[in-house]
Image: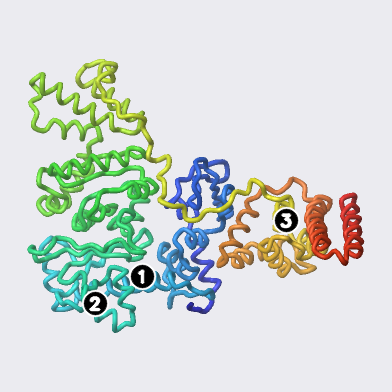
């Protein structure tokens, strides 16, 4: 285990203030407005009805189904398995906050966390190394010449931190070993390879290397493009603890700000397509990583934008891939459009041939609706003057329309087709294939496994509820803290409740005012809970509870009575067990039992 020094409070505060909890959680959970809160399906346990609540005002979340709760820090820690220092680093990167000297924390890192941190550090080192080789060394000239021949400028190359892995079998291996990285971990991270004979060697040797970053800009993998055409065209990072290609999009972190501003994204197929399109002025461009566009990709885009423009290659394979992407996106409330390029042309070819200005005109004026794209694609090779060809075209259109999950879109497409050919809608509907019940993708994309499962709170004991209500009352002001402290002390049955109460007791002096409490208590309690997920979960739940309308001393006394009654009952049960276990002391124990019963009765009658 590795112990690190404490993170300064001002660093924590700056990162937290810069992180919008709704934006952060919306990257994983589809949230809907409900009064002053937003609700969605909990990412920490399986459920069909939303019980996960986010309060933008308080900067906290809580699941009323499983009990998960906390703030922006605990959300990242629990969903991504990061330590507190790693979380600060991750969110600082996300918010474009530079932290001098990095960050560290006073907690201990598990072995898995140490390994993941080493992997992230190594990816950063290797990306810097490859980029320096490309831009500043003789060994990298072959890679730079290749990129410049593709029309890419140095500013674009630098913005995406493109690099070159020298044509040397152990360049990366030796570089990492000199810096003290564990080579076995580097193999697991996908940065180097290992032969059956146990020899380490470079994975991306002799390739132009494109760094792949996660949504926060942290480099987690690479895509290597061969310059020698006799080699396999691309070598990509395989799935690792950091890298899952079905969740990552090349260029996402660079495009993120523009995507949010423009509320749209251009989706292309290749890495070089991304560079060319961005260089031509369309900054909101991303690409999937040499694999089919996935439901995770669709969900990530749907949370960021309102419009998706698909611009895949102009050949038949590209158009078929476009239709598959359309199917995944149609289940979301998105305006999906298609840019059709000439056959055997991709965005890179088009821009190099026609220039940036012509590309911009194409983007702004030549976009097709999904129906028009289907129409144009299926008309290819058909003579529409022939009745038989027209019928086959209409039937093929109906087949494609029937695959549309969204019933509103489906009906709209059928109506437009009916209007075009002056055929009654009923006739077309009667000829449309049935594909079974439709499932709207956007309603719920099931995860392979929830982040964490918790037991239901449906049968929560009365004393637990009473302790929570007392804590909720104490969060409203110092007078109630002093009242509960003097009457209950630390006689809480739940350990987490006891620790939260202890923290409140510590900061509330005899003369603290309401104004002082409101300034001191919330930030103190959040700092106290930040690095303790169990405390943060409970604290978030309690803060988000609805407090009783009147928190009089009589009401607080009732809660205290419930807790004390439970403690008395525990002692009664303990005495009963002792009686059964020790027959010789039965008279003394019976006397003790009677005394406890009498005290309990008096307490209930107060």
- The x, y position of residue 159, in whole percent, is 26, 65
How far apart are labels 1 and 2 at the CA level? Answer: 24 Å
Give the spatial CA distance, label 2 vs label 3: 59 Å
Label located before the other in sequence (2 or 3): 2
Given the current orientation, which residue lies at the most extreme front position? 584
Q: Distance between the residues labelled 3 and 1?
A: 42 Å
Which is more toward the observer, 58 or 457? 457
**Mark 2 element type:** loop
Query: In the image, is 354 to the left or to the right of 374?
Result: left
Residue 337 drawn above or below residue 204? above
Disc 3 marks which residue? 467
Q: Is residue 343 above or below residue 165?
A: above
State which quadrant residue 422 falls in: top left
Identify residue for label 1.
120
Q: Does dot 3 land on a helix, a strand or a loop?
A: helix
- Crowding at label 3, few (<14), some or many (≥20) Cα neighbours within 10 Å? many
Residue tagged 2: 198
* Image: 446 above or below 115: above
Relative side of 454 to 82, left or right = right
Query: Image check: 19 left or right of 355?
Result: right
User: Residue sitting at 37 percent across and 40 percent down?
Assistant: 441
């Amino acid at each position: 285990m590795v112990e690190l020094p404490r993170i300064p409070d001002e660093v924590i505060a700056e990162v937290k203030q810069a992180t919008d909890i709704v934006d952060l959680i919306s990257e994983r959970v589809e949230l809907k407005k409900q009064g002053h809160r937003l609700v969605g399906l909990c990412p920490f346990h399986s459920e069909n009805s939303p019980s996960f609540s986010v309060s933008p005002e308080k900067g906290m979340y809580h699941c009323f189904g499983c009990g998960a709760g906390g703030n922006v820090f605990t959300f990242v820690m629990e969903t991504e398995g990061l330590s507190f220092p790693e979380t600060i680093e991750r969110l600082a990167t996300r918010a474009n906050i530079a932290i001098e000297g990095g960050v560290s924390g006073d907690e201990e890192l598990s072995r898995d966390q140490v390994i993941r941190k080493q992997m992230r550090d190594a990816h950063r080192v290797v990306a810097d190394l490859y980029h320096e080789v490309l831009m500043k060394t003789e060994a990298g000239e072959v890679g730079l010449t290749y990129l410049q021949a593709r029309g890419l400028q140095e500013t674009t190359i630098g913005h995406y931190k493109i690099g070159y892995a020298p044509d040397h079998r152990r360049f990366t291996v030796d570089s990492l070993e000199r810096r003290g990285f564990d080579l076995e971990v580097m193999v697991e991270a996908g940065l180097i390879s290992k032969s059956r004979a146990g020899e380490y060697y470079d994975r991306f040797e002799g390739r132009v290397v494109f760094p792949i970053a996660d949504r926060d800009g942290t480099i987690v993998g690479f895509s290597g493009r061969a310059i020698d055409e006799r080699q396999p065209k691309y070598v990509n990072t395989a799935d690792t603890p950091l890298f899952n290609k079905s969740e990552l999009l090349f260029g996402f972190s660079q495009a993120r700000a523009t995507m949010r501003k423009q509320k749209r994204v251009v989706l292309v197929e290749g890495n070089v397509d991304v560079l060319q399109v961005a260089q031509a002025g369309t900054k909101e461009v991303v690409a999937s990583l040499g694999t089919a566009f996935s439901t995770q990709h669709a969900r990530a885009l749907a949370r960021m934008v309102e419009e998706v423009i698909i611009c895949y290659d102009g050949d038949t394979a590209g158009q078929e891939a476009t239709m598959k992407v359309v199917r995944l996106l149609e289940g979301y409330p998105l305006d999906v459009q298609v840019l059709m390029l000439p056959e055997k042309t991709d965005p890179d070819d088009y821009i190099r041939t026609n220039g940036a200005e012509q590309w911009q005109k194409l983007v702004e004026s030549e976009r097709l609706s999904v129906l028009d794209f289907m129409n144009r694609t299926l008309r290819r090779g058909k003579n529409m003057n022939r009745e038989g060809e027209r019928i086959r075209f209409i039937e093929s259109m109906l087949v494609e329309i029937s695959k549309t999950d969204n019933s509103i879109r489906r009906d709209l497409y059928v109506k437009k087709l009916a209007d075009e050919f002056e055929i009654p809608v009923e006739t077309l509907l009667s000829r449309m294939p049935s594909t079974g019940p439709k499932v709207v993708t956007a309603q719920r994309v099931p995860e392979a496994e929830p982040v964490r499962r918790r037991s239901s709170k449906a049968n929560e004991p009365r004393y637990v509820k009473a302790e929570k209500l007392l804590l909720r009352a104490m969060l409203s002001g110092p007078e109630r803290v002093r009242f509960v402290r003097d009457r209950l002390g630390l006689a809480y049955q739940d350990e987490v409740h006891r620790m939260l109460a202890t923290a409140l007791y510590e900061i509330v002096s005899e003369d603290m005012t309401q104004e002082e409490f409101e300034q001191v208590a919330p930030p103190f309690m959040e700092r106290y809970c930040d690095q303790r997920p169990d405390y943060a979960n409970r604290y978030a739940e309690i803060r988000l509870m609805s407090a009783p309308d009147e928190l009089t001393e009589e009401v607080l006394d009732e809660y205290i009575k419930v807790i004390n009654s439970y403690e008395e009952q525990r002692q009664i049960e303990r005495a009963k067990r002792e009686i059964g276990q020790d027959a010789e002391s039965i008279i003394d124990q019976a006397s003790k039992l009677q005394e406890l019963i009498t005290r309990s009765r008096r307490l209930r009658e107060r």
